[in-house]
C-alpha cells in the first residue's frame, strides 16, 4: 500500500476553506471620524496620539504622515465636520428654496438633525462640551453662515407677504432659529429615547409657529431703532 503521509520536513497543507483577507485599511475620512469621536469625548488635551491611533485602527506614524501634528489633526477634524454639515444644510436650503415657509424650515431642520444622527462624533466635536479652539472657530463659521442664509430667507418671506424686508428683526429671528435647532439636535443626541426624525418635526413646528405669530409691529419698532 502506498504511503500518502506528508514527507518528513514538508510543511503541513492548510485545509481548503475560506481565505483570510487582511482588514481594509481605514481611509482618511475613517481616521478623521475616529479622531473626531475621541476629541469629542476626551477633549483636545486629554486625547493622546496613542489613543487616537488605536481608535482609528492605525498607527501614530500614519496619523502624523497624513495629518501632521495633533493640533493639525484636530483642525482637520473640525473643518471636515463644519464643511460637510454646511454642505448638507445648504443643499437642503437650495432644494426647498421655492417651497412654502414651513417646508423650507423642515428641510433645514431635518438635514441638521439627520447629520447629528449619522455623524455623532463630528457633531459633538462642533457642539459638544469639548468644542474649543479650532472646533469653536469652525462652529462659529458654520452658525454665522446658516444665520445669514436664514436671515435672507426671512426677509424674502416678509417682503413677499407685504411686511417689508425686515432688518435687524430678521437677523434676530434667524439667530433664534439656529439656536433652537442646535439645542434641539444636541438634546436629541444625548437622549437615547428620542427619535431624531420625530424630534426634528417637533422642532420644525415650534420654529414655524414662532415665526408665524410674531407681531409685525414689534419687528417694525425694532428695525426703526437701526
Image (cartoon, rainbow, N blue to C red):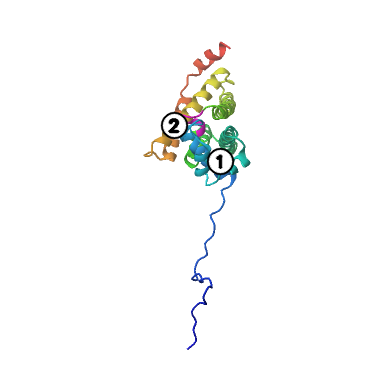
Q: Which of 77/53 is in front?
A: 53
From the image, which quarter does the C terminus lie in?
top right
Mark 2, residue position: 184
Asked if the magenta segment contains residue 129, the reply would be yes
Instruction: Identify which residue is drawn at 52% across, 44% down.
Output: 56
Q: Residue at x 57, y 43 (%)?
A: 29
Is residue 32 or residue 16 the one in the foreground?
16
The residue range painted magenta reads 125-131
* Secondary structure type for disc 2: helix
Report x, y in % for residue 114: 49, 40
Q: How many marks?
A: 2
Q: CA distance from mark 1 to mark 2?
A: 25 Å
Q: Residue furthest left?
A: 193
Q: How many residues crowd mark 1 within 10 Å: few (<14), some (14–19), many (20+)?
A: many
Estimate the x, y position of residue 79 in percent, counting from the top left: 59, 34
Is residue 97 something one can see in this rendering?
no
Q: Residue furthest top?
A: 225
* Residue 192: % across, % down: 38, 39
Furthest residue toward bottom? 1
Foreground disc of the pair 1, 2: 1
Element under disc 1: helix
Of callouts 1 and 2, the N-terminal one: 1
Examine the image and state in which quarter residue 155 appears.
top right
Q: Looking at the picture, does residue 74 appear above or below residue 173?
A: below
Q: Determine contact: label 1, label 2, CB under 8 Å.
A: no
Q: Which mark is residue 176?
A: none
The residue carrying pointer 2 sits among few (fewer than 14), some (14 to 19) or many (20 or more) residues within 10 Å by Cα, namely: some
Q: Nearer the viewer, residue 35 or 180?
A: 35
Picture coordinates of residue 104 (x, y %)? 53, 34
Q: Indicate yes or no whether the magenta region holds residue 206.
A: no
In this orientation, does residue 56 appear? Answer: yes
Residue highlighted by disc 1: 32
Amino acid at each position: 500500500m502506498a504511503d500518502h503521509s506528508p514527507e518528513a520536513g514538508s510543511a503541513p497543507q492548510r485545509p481548503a476553506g475560506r481565505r483570510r483577507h487582511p482588514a481594509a485599511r481605514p481611509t482618511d475620512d475613517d481616521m478623521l471620524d475616529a479622531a473626531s469621536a475621541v476629541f469629542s469625548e476626551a477633549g483636545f488635551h486629554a486625547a493622546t496620539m496613542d489613543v487616537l491611533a488605536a481608535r482609528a485602527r492605525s498607527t501614530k506614524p500614519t496619523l502624523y504622515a497624513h495629518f501632521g501634528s495633533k493640533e493639525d489633526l484636530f483642525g482637520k477634524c473640525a473643518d471636515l465636520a463644519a464643511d460637510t454639515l454646511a454642505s448638507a444644510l445648504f443643499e437642503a436650503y437650495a432644494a426647498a428654496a421655492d417651497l412654502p415657509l414651513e417646508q423650507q424650515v423642515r428641510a433645514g431642520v431635518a438635514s441638521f438633525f439627520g447629520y447629528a444622527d449619522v455623524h455623532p462624533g463630528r457633531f459633538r466635536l462642533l457642539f459638544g462640551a469639548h468644542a474649543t479652539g479650532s472646533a469653536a472657530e469652525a462652529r462659529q463659521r458654520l452658525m454665522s453662515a446658516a444665520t445669514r442664509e436664514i436671515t435672507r430667507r426671512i426677509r424674502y418671506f416678509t417682503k413677499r407677504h407685504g411686511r417689508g424686508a425686515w432688518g435687524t428683526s430678521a437677523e434676530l429671528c434667524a439667530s433664534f432659529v439656529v439656536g433652537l435647532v442646535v439645542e434641539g439636535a444636541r438634546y436629541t443626541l444625548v437622549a437615547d429615547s428620542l427619535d431624531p426624525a420625530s424630534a426634528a418635526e417637533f422642532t420644525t413646528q415650534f420654529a414655524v409657529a414662532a415665526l408665524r405669530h410674531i407681531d409685525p409691529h414689534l419687528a417694525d419698532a425694532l428695525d426703526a431703532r437701526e
